[in-house]
Structure formats: structure tokens, C-alpha cells
Amino acid sequence: MALSFSAKLMRGVSRCAALVTPKTAPTSCRYFSSAENSRVLVNLNDKTGVATMQLNRPPVNSLNLEVLTDMTIALDKLQTEKDCRGMILTSSSPGIFCAGLDIMEMYNPQEDRLREFWRTLQELWKMMYGSRLATIAAINGHSPAGGCLLSLTCDYRIMAQGKFTIGLNETLLGIVAPFWFQDTMVNTVGHRETERALQLGLLYSGENALKVGLIDELVSPEKVMETAEGQMQMWLKIPDFARQLTKEQLRGPTVQKLAQHQEADIDHFVNFITKKAIQKSLEMYLNMLKQKKK
Ligand SMILES: CCCCC/C=C\C/C=C\CCC/C=C/C(=O)SCCNC(=O)CCNC(=O)[C@H](O)C(C)(C)COP(=O)(O)OP(=O)(O)OC[C@H]1O[C@@H](n2cnc3c(N)ncnc32)[C@H](O)[C@@H]1OP(=O)(O)O
């Protein structure tokens, strides 16, 4: 019998919930670690109540079904830890925060896996956008499409200075950012900027992202984590219940909107992505990525 998403999640939690403290770890730091969730590295500092989640899928941290599942399981686990109050999301590969969704999940897909992939992304987005934790994205490199979306689900974004770019560039691949990607962008930068950014598939430099409010701070690469930790202290000075209820009032309706249309959104995605013309666009984009290297 097929397991529901939440049943799979619960099964996953019990499988990878072990907290392992390596010999080198500071005593206040617990590491959520197992072979199964090494695609995301998670630790929780018991003293500060702040967790760090690092995307760890070289070379570019593209989000396949397994990474999305591991992130969902790890976030669920952190949210059930009553002393965990905040989370910093970053990458273990400086230079690349996240290359977005793994295009190989959408190119020549098997329908069952494609559906599961999209449902898992929806679940992760709902959990992140509505998380009770204060969340900060430490964007230490490129952050296109799904990478930008992940950072937009956080409460605050700090990006590294340099040649890195961020944005919802789906139209450049010949695909369309779904309504909940758009909603997240509108809630951050406003309607007019979203119209421009999404139609043109804009990838912003750090400076331009700061100008339009897509990120909140732009700092040197070596200062990204330290700035995130400092900013987190400010967020954690606010009583949790007041901060959480305020977030719920502001973001709840957006999360509810997807929750109410989740099945239709999966059907829509599958119908769209499996169209011949869309598959052709993805193939051309993949070839372009490979050509770029030569
Ligand atoms: C009415 C209609 C409504 C329809 C709405 C319904 C449904 C909506 C439909 C679809 C929605 C889908 C939403 C999609 C979201 C996404 O996130 S799509 C992914 C977008 N990502 C990108 O465009 C980024 C592409 N990558 C890059 O630009 C660069 O790789 C980089 C991140 C800047 C890093 O550059 P560099 O360090 O130079 O690394 P390489 O380019 O050499 O890459 C290394 C290898 O990784 C492969 N790769 C890169 N990105 C991805 C990826 N996203 N997925 C899979 N693979 C990726 C790259 O090809 C290299 O592979 P090889 O080493 O050559 O094998």
C-alpha cells in the first residue's frame, strides 16, 4: 500500500533522528547525522538553540527528490526539538548556495517519481515558509530558481558579495514559476518587481538584489555566517510566541492557498513538464549548461 506523505516522513524521522556527537564537536553542539541524510548536514547548538542546515550535494546542490526528502525530515526533526528556536540555511560548497531543482528530475521523467518529487517540494516549501523557527538564509554563492525559492522561505537573507546571482529564472529554461513561487516573490519584493523579474527570468547581482529587497544584506563571503549568527540573536530576542503568531498571520494565507490547491498543482506540473515542447526546452538548457564548460 502506498504510504501517505506524512507516514513516509514519520518513517524517515525515526530512521535518521539519531543525534551523534563526533569527538571533535563542541559539547553544546549536537549533530544530526546518518549515512542517509548526509546530503544535508544539520547540527543544533544546545546553548543558543540555533541549528545550521547545510546543503551538501556537490557539485551544485541541485535539489533532487532525495535532498528534498532529507531536508524535510531534518526540518521536521528540528521543529520537534523544543529547545530549537532558529535555523540558518546555507551550503557546504562556498560559491554555490543551490542551483535550484535538479533538472534531471524533470527531464524524461517517470510519472510516479515526478509526482513524488513535486509533492516533496510542496511539503518542504509549506514547512519552511510557515516554520515556527526563525530562519535565516546564509547565501554563500549562486542561488537561481529553486535556490532562490528556498532562500525566500526564510525570514532574512544574507548574501555573499562577488559574481554570484540570485533570482527566479525559470522562463530562461522555457518553464514557468508556479503560483506559489510567484506568491513568495511578491510577498518579498512586491507585485511590480515580480512581474518584471519573473517574465524576464532575471538573475540579480547581489547589489541589485539588495536594491529591490530580494536580499536583506550583502557582505563579504567570509562574513556571511558570522552576520547570520549576529542577526539570529536579534530575532531570538523577540518572545517566540509573538514572533511566531505574527509570522503565521502574515504567511499563513499564502501557505493555505497552496494547501488548498496542492493536488491540482501536482497535476498541472506533471501535465506541463511532460509536454514535448517543454522537454525540448529542458534538453536545450541542459546542453547549454554542458557547452558552457567547453
Ligand atoms: C499555465 C502554465 C502554468 C505552468 C505552471 C506549472 C508548473 C510549473 C512547471 C515547472 C516549474 C519548475 C520550477 C523549476 C525550478 C528550478 O529550480 S529549475 C533549475 C534552474 N537552475 C538553473 O537554471 C541553474 C543552472 N546551473 C547554473 O547556472 C550553474 O550550474 C551554476 C549554478 C551557476 C554553477 O555554475 P558552475 O559552478 O560553473 O557549475 P557548472 O555549470 O559547470 O555545473 C556543474 C554540473 O552541474 C550540472 N547542473 C548545474 N545546475 C543543475 C541543475 N539545476 N540541475 C541539474 N544539473 C545541474 C551542470 O550541467 C554540470 O553538469 P556536468 O558536470 O556537465 O555533467
Image (tube, helix red, strand yellow):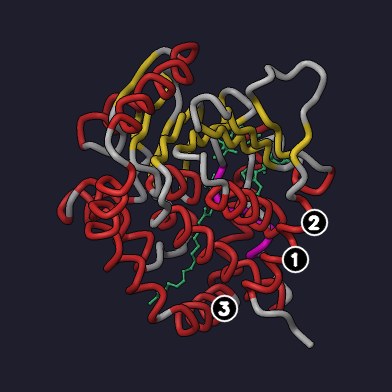
Closer to the camera: disc 3 or disc 1?
1
Q: Which residues are magenta?
A: 99-106
Q: Residue 266, how many percent across, how many down?
A: 52, 78
Which of the 4 quarters of the picture holds residue 92? top right
Q: Which residue is identified by label 3?
A: 270
Q: Give the residue at x 30% y 64%.
A: 252
User: x, y percentage for residue 151?
Assistant: 43, 42
Numbered disc total: 3
Q: Amino acid under label 2?
A: Arg
Label 2–label 3 contact, CB within 8 A: no
Mark 1 secondary-structure assignment: helix
Q: Judge depth for marks 2 and 3 and give the one in front.
A: 2
Left or right: residue 20 versus residue 107 is right
> Who comes first in sequence, dot 2 or dot 3?
2
**What's the CA distance linking mark 2 and mark 3?**
30 Å
Q: Position of residue 149 (x, y in %)?
A: 43, 50
Mark 1: which amino acid? Arg
Residues under labels 3 and 1: Cα distance? 26 Å
Tell whether 17 sits left or right of 190: right
- Where does label 1 land, which residue? 11
Please tell me which residue is depicted at 45% across the width and 19% down the height of the picture: 224
Q: Secondary structure at mark 3?
A: helix
Q: Pick the residue in front: 88 or 157.
A: 88
What residue is pinned by disc 2?
15
Could you tell me if the residues under marks 1 and 2 are in contact, i.e. CB atoms within 8 Å?
yes
Q: Residues within 10 Å of mark 2 (few under 14, many from 20)?
A: few
